[in-house]
Amino acid sequence: MRAEQHVLVLVDDTEVSGLLLKWGRAGERALVTYEVDGRVATLWLRADQLRPAPDGPLAPEPLTD
């Protein structure tokens, strides 16, 4: 994954949309920002807690009748 790309972040067994800002020197950790329960967090996370987002930011669920 390259820096400054949308990713899915594993937080407490749930995936949330985030933005990868920067890789650490060894490539084992990444600086990521994401939102959970209305709170924004920017943290260094292990690479195994991230995966590329399918198509950029997660789209909202379509409205149904």
Image: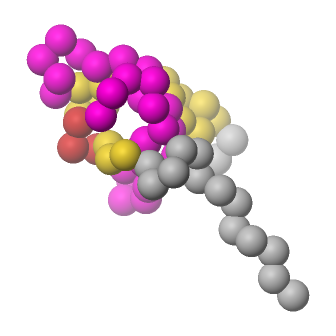
User: Colour scheme in the image?
Assistant: secondary structure
Return the x and y of residue 29 as percentages of the image width and height: 23, 26
In the displayed structure, 2 sits above or below 13; it is above
x 29%, y 19%: residue: 23
Q: Is residue 3 magenta?
A: yes
- Depth check, front residue: 32 or 64: 64
Q: Residue furthest top?
A: 25
In the displayed structure, 29 sits above or below 26; it is below
Horizontally, residue 42 falls left or right of residue 27, namely right
Return the x and y of residue 22 as percentages of the image width and height: 36, 18
For the C terminus, the image quarter is: bottom right
Q: Residue furthest left?
A: 26
Return the x and y of residue 59 as percentages of the image width and height: 65, 56
Which residues lie in the magenta part?
A: 1-28
x 30%, y 34%: residue: 1
Return the x and y of residue 55 as percentages of the image width and height: 51, 51
In the displayed structure, 38 sits above or below 10; it is above
Q: Residue furthest front?
A: 55
- For the stretch drawn in magenta, the main secondary structure is strand
Q: Is residue 30 magenta?
A: no
